[in-house]
Image (cartoon, grey):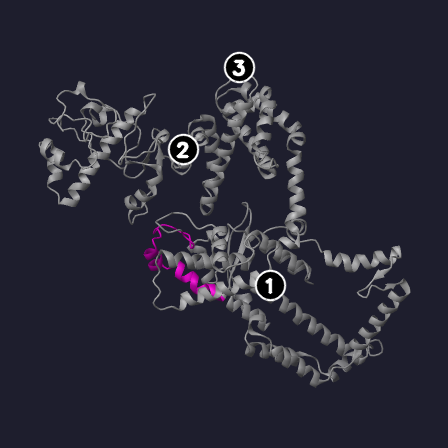
Amino acid sequence: MSKKDTASDVDTSYRPDDSISETRDEASDVDTSYRPDDSISETSDEETEIPEVEEVVYYREKLTRHIKTVHNDNQRVKDALKFPKREMQKQFDLMRKEGIYIVNNGEMKKNDPKYEQERRTTSKKPPVMCGLCKGFYNRASFSRHKVKCRGKTSANCDHIPMSGISCDLSAFNVEILNRFRTDEVGEICRTDLTLINIGKKFWDKKKNKKDKKLEGRKSVMSDMRRLATLYNFFKKHLVNKTQCDLKGDISDMFKRKHFTSLVEAIDEYTTDEVTTSLKAGLKSGLYYLIRRACLIIKGTHLEQERDTDASEVDKFLDVLKLNEDFVFGDASYQQNQNRQKNLRKPTVLPLENDVQKLREYTLNQITTMINDPYMIWDSHNFRKLRDLTVSRLTLYNARRGGEPCRLVIEEWQEAKNNTWVDKYHADGISDPLEKSLINKLKITFQTGKGNNHLVPVLFPQDCVDAMDVLSKPEARSSAGVAEDNKYVFACVQRSQNHVTGWHAINSICVEAEISCLEKLTATKNRHRISTLYASMELPEAERSLFYKHMGHSSTINQNVYQAPPALMEIIKIGRGWNTLTKVPIIHKNDRLMDLEEEEEIIEKSKRGKRRKDDRLMDSEEEEEIIEKRRKRKKDDRLMDSEEEEEIIEKRRKSLKAKNEALTFLNKYMLHESYPWKTVRSKVMNERVKRQRQIKERMEIMEM
């Protein structure tokens, strides 16, 4: 393989059989060394004096021997030959990448480009460029190169499509535009200037939420892809495609004369191709997405003093508002039906056996991994402990799937150091149960859904050691977590992101062999907890705290999350309805009972209840009840037997003696209205009721 003698004879087309496609003037001392910090955009000749493409040596594939023999008088080659073998090969690889970059930069200007890349491929898709080393690779194999190129650093090593190489390297381009797929919709997102402007505005609103960076990026990309997909359908339904006022971008959709075509595009986009059913969530979301996009376009017109165009956008919004019920009414109705009926049925809630099984599996696995002194925290073990802890915290706190998974190390340190607990008021608590909870539970607060409130995250004792391991620098380093990744539940492979809650819970459910995977999710667990709390007899103050913990109002809890109280409706309202309408009641023996028989049964039950309430409970019966409570299983209570005995003993001693009670009744002339037996029974009943409520609360917290 020989060197071309003249630059005019150089052919820049791709020839797989050639080892060299172009040659650089050997006498030229121009430094074309690779500059990682330079912009991808072309540089002027006055700054770098980069020679023409025909004069650049295009190194490709194992040309070390050719470089040594033919170009040994070049200064860069001379310097490279002085290095050891491994470093010398890196220099030659660098030269090859520079040549490919210069050739592809020229090919992008052609109508029918033929791009070069590092390795030969049969794929007809254009390559992508590595944002770190500027090499060109096949998109399918880029993930392997990413691991090798980035090494142990946390440098940004994202792929850049060919259509995005001429763009600047701003945060919006790196985080949003360069991440779109190389399909038709992705190309629209990268090339449509109006859509790019809309996406930038969306990104400017989301980028400042540092703890929600991943959610913000996904939201912006999803909105841009939806608008691009809708624009594709819109072009198919456009009645008159030859109109002279078409701009050729998505702003054509937001004109009054094209509203009919837009409605047809929306209907086609939101209809399932297979089942022809309506995608209600997508259609309802498109309405608000179109409104936000129109407001951004209007603002751009006003900034550029195009008042006429801005007024046209206003008129389009008026047309959209007037037709809201006609175009999007079916989607709103179906969404309300799904929310009120399908999502709140008890049959779609998680099975209690599955919840208990998952809890036992999670606790056993966490305990086993933490107590293993020979555990090596590689990426596999780190991911498993991370998913176990995320699943435990998400279901224990009844949080949304995207909340506990984005906890940062700083928030965990606040919980560990009891930063949110007022020590002065904590020391003043006298209830032993409450003091035990303060000692065993950790708490922190993080941003919830929206911007204006914080939601709590409780850490049970079984998660404290796991959180320490996940936040320990040594374990994170050995697992491949980036040093500057601030999330506790971080992704490995030097990523800057955190794990998603749904994937963590689903992976643990699969390992635990849960029977109904589709039911045991974070959202359905919130429905389950809301339903259980609604069935408990709690004062209004405790219910208010529960709503704050869940991060929603009592109206949302009643109308969206909790299942309708069907049993209470049957028992209470059904009995009254039967009384009012004189409908006979059918019991198990299928015997018809008229209204008089029913009243007789109710009267007997009342007399039996009065006899039970009026009887005196002696000390032996009380000790028998206490002994039975001591023998309950350890898994059904929060404290061990010694703590429970101490609490029961303190509460038993705190009851007023008979003489003191009689003295009080005589002093205030209450002994005739309230005999000693009645007072004694009421006190004991209140104590039993209080202990039952505490037990129910503990059972819900352990779930």
Instruction: Measuring from the top left, give residue 638's x and y in whole percent.
Output: 56, 70
Quarter-wise, where is residue 371 in the image? bottom left
| Residue ID for mark 3 | 243
How crowded pointer 1 is (Cα within 10 Å; few <14, some 14-19, many 20+) is rated as few
Instruction: Measuring from the top left, give residue 275's x and y in whole percent.
Output: 59, 37
Please tell me whether residue 21 is drawn above or below residue 637 in the rendered image. above
Please give left or right for residue 548 compared with residue 52 in the image: right
Kind of residue at badge 2: Thr
Kind of residue at badge 1: Ile
User: Disc 2, disc 3: CB below 8 Å?
Assistant: no
Task: Say if the magenta span includes residue 482.
Answer: yes
Q: Residue at the spot x=89%, y=62% of the render?
A: 595
Which span of residues is magenta-colored?
461-490
Circle 1 SS class = helix
Question: Which residue is more in the foreground, 38 or 425?
Answer: 38
| Residue ID for mark 1 | 700
Please tell me whether residue 628 is drawn above or below residue 474 in the rendered image. below
Q: Tell me the number on the disc at residue 182.
A: 2
- For the residues labelled 2 and 3, the Cα–Cα distance comes to 30 Å
